[in-house]
Amino acid sequence: MNTIKQQPDGNYPLPSLEQNYLLSSLPADVRERLKPHLQLITLPLGKCLYESGDEQKYVYFPTNSIISLVYVLFNGDSAEISVVGNEGMLGLPLFMGGGSTPNRAVVQSAGNAYQLSARLLKEEFRGHDQLHELLLRYTQSLMTQMAQTAVCNRHHSIEQQLCRWILLSLDRIPSNVLTMTQELIADMLGVRREGVSVAAGKLQKLGVIEYHRGVVTVLNRVHLEKLSCECYEVVKAECERLLHYLPEDYNLHD
């Protein structure tokens, strides 16, 4: 059963379309046609948006949530290949010739997203050169993230991987606080939970992060970047080169 809930009405401000940079950068005519069909939803932590092989009927534009693309082996082991946040969208296979992928999409950090019928966006994609270029550029940036993640998981320490992972996650939400368990982090990195616990403990002792009951607070981003491997900088640089719609202070948080 789908447990994704529509955002309830209330007196507090709701996430706007502008909080997803890709969505806000759609060509004006496309955005106006799609706007009535965008539904603001709540994504709970750990929610699976689609399983391997599922037909993707919707695309998602996160505003303050993070979605992980995860590969799961037959024995149950898993590893994250990329993350999607307020810089992009979930659902690119729809524009690459196939309606499904062998990976799973899981909510890594709870929050909100705009949901849209995949059919509607695909119709716009087919007849709009500017939208075509925008989504292809985003696809290339995501492919870079996937490739660099594979290299990082093979050649760098768990501590370096954790730093890279936290930084990439942090860049994709408007906050320096991440809500996630060590078990979830271990699943994303494809390592044992004990390894994550040791690495997180080192970062806490250095005053880089604070971890308490599933909440990771980044206290010193500059130091965190120094402890990470070059993989983070490669992904960051490629995002900045390809995604011209990102604000200049995209990677900076107070």
Image: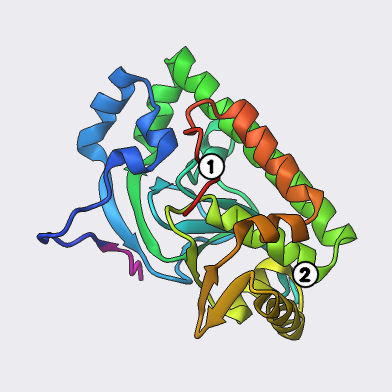
Magenta stretch prevailing secondary structure: loop
117 vs 42: above or below? above
Secondary structure beneath label 1: loop
Decide whether residue 2 is among the magenta residues: yes
From the image, state whether disc 1 or disc 2 is nearer to you. Answer: 2
Disc 1 marks which amino acid? Gly
Residue 201, horizontal then vertical, whole percent = 70, 82
- In which image quadrant can residue 34 be found? top left
Q: Name the residue under label 1.
A: 99
Secondary structure beneath label 2: helix
Residue 6, horizontal then vertical, whole percent = 23, 60
Residue 242, horizontal then vertical, whole percent = 61, 27
Start-end of magenta stretch: 1-5
For label 2, count other residues whose C-alpha is less than 10 Å away and answer few (under 14), some (14-19) or many (20+): many
Q: Mark 2 points at which residue?
A: 159
Decide whether residue 242 is among the magenta residues: no
Disc 2 marks which amino acid? Glu
- Front one among 245 and 5: 245
197 vs 32: above or below? below
Q: Can residue 67 be seen in this view?
A: yes
Q: Do the residues labelled 1 and 2 touch (CB within 8 Å)?
A: no
Q: What residue lies at 70% left-to-right and 55% top-to-bottom?
A: 225
Q: Earlier in the sequence, mark 1 or mark 2?
A: 1
Q: Can residue 97 be seen in this view?
A: no
For label 1, count other residues whose C-alpha is less than 10 Å away and answer few (under 14), some (14-19) or many (20+): some
- In which image quadrant can residue 47 be found? bottom left
Residue 253, horizontal then vertical, whole percent = 49, 52
125 vs 84: above or below? above
